[in-house]
């Protein structure tokens, strides 16, 4: 079964001026891509600022909402301190001219490889460079080796038919975001739930600790208008900006050329949101379809368990990477343990969305262009048969 969904103000915050007093410019708090120590921040002072005097000011004015936990740092290591701060103290620090920057206090872990032994074939294929010795696409006996960070701290927005958030694969990491098009707040198709399972499901997923957010822009029949999809992407942009978290928009959809849709996905990448897009299932050049043809997104073609380009997969110069996409087992609707085995570049795309999430949680976030380059540099080269001239022969790989 091949599934490929076809595509049929910012608020201005106004504050009354305080006459006679300049408006302080607040430092932006640097977000950490991953788990953080609650209410804890690292404060870097400007060179030449006396730390003792600054701490005395903080204690005298905001001592009731601040606790300095690390005052001992020498200036040659890091001229500043760390502590836990309530909202009043944090805002005062953000406005203080002594401060160079403020960052969330992140939690680091031992980076260890984890091995799953009940994985579908696609997960093993992206975690090794060699062709699979077994060729049973229905088996859940494959081995998937991945970094233990597993997408922690990363949000994946599934722009699709919705997500059955109660499915056992998601373990509370999936939530409903927003619906566009007047549809019910539910996945009545299964496509979005399947995609989500491959991106971040506990059994079928690449990034097993990433968060999933449903952005429903397609009907239960699997179609939707460009205008609704653009509205969904606009909402993703707003939410990612508000959260400050590393974010990925995964679009397993496409259709005819649309400048409006191309511009919308490009806008997301310009704001730092990573975008993965299905190449399409028409066995044609993807340069004639949107949003696959948009240069700034990661456009994904589909491969088979035999390391061939799937017969339906689109191709061409706009394809950036291939990933497993034929006979993929993942979560489905109907019950909290339902599964389905289906095919399409829709199924290949979330493999790469999950891979991006894993790279971010392991190595830190970077620009969409930088992460796209890393995806291509890590890929297994020349492994696939049936690749037309002018199309990359790169198969997604996680380098663990």
Image (tube, rainbow, N blue to C red):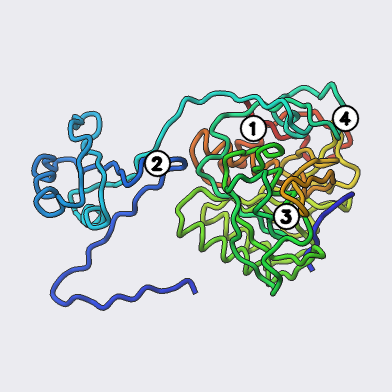
Marks 4 & 2, CB-CB < 8 Å contact: no
* Left or right: 311 as drawn, with respect to 58: right
Of residues 214 and 295, which is closer to you in this image?
214
Res 43 quadrant in image: top left
Point 52% across, 37% down: residue: 361
Residue 136: mark? 4
Distance between the alpha carbons at the discs numbered 3 and 4:
25 Å
Please tell me whether mark 1 or mark 3 is closer to you in this view.
Answer: 3
Quickly name the residue at label 1: 377
- Residue highlighted by disc 3: 192
Asked whether, in this view, residue 80 is left or right of residue 358, the answer is left
Q: Alpha-carbon distance for marks 2 and 3?
A: 30 Å
Query: Mark 2 vs mark 3: which is more N-terminal?
Result: 2
Q: Earlier in the sequence, mark 2 or mark 1?
A: 2
- Is the residue 54 above or below the residue 175 in the image? above
Q: Earlier in the sequence, mark 1 or mark 3?
A: 3
| Residues at marks 4 and 2, CA–CA distance in whole angstroms | 41 Å
Sequence-first disc among 1 and 4: 4
Q: Which residue is mark 2?
A: 36
């Amino acid at each position: 079964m091949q599934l490929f969904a076809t595509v049929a103000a910012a608020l201005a915050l106004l504050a009354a001026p305080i006459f006679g007093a300049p408006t302080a410019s607040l430092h932006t708090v640097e977000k950490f891509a991953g788990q953080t120590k609650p209410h804890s921040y690292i404060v870097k002072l400007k060179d030449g600022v006396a730390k003792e005097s600054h701490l005395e000011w903080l204690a005298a004015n905001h001592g009731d909402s601040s606790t300095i936990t690390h005052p001992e740092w020498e200036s040659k290591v890091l001229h500043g301190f760390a502590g836990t701060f309530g909202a009043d103290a944090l805002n005062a620090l953000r406005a203080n001219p002594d401060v160079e920057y403020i960052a969330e206090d992140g939690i680091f872990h031992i980076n260890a490889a984890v091995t799953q032994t009940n994985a579908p074939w696609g997960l093993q294929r992206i975690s090794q460079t060699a062709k699979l010795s077994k060729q049973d696409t229905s088996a859940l006996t494959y081995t998937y080796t991945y970094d233990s960070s597993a997408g922690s701290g990363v949000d994946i927005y599934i722009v699709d038919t919705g997500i059955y958030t109660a499915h056992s694969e998601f373990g509370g990491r999936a939530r409903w975001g927003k619906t566009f098009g007047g549809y019910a707040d539910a996945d009545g198709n299964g496509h979005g739930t399947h995609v989500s399972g491959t991106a971040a499901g506990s059994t079928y997923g690449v990034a097993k600790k990433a968060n999933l957010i449903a952005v429903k822009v397609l009907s239960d029949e699997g179609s939707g208008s460009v205008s609704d999809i653009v509205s969904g992407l606009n909402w993703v942009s707003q939410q990612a900006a508000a959260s400050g978290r590393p974010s990925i928009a995964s679009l397993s959809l496409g259709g005819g050329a649309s400048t409006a849709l191309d511009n919308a996905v490009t806008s997301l990448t310009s704001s730092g949101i990573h975008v993965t897009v299905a190449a399409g299932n028409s066995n044609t050049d993807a340069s004639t379809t949107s949003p696959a043809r948009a240069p700034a997104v990661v456009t994904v073609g589909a491969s088979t368990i035999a390391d061939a380009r799937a017969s339906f997969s689109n191709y061409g110069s706009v394809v950036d990477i291939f990933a497993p996409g034929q006979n993929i087992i993942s979560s489905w609707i109907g019950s909290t343990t339902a599964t389905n085995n289906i095919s399409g570049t829709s199924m290949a795309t979330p493999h790469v969305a999950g891979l991006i999430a894993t790279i971010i949680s392991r190595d830190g976030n970077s620009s969409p262009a930088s992460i796209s380059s890393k995806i291509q540099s890590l890929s297994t080269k020349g492994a696939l048969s049936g690749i037309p001239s002018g199309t990359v022969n790169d198969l997604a790989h996680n380098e663990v």
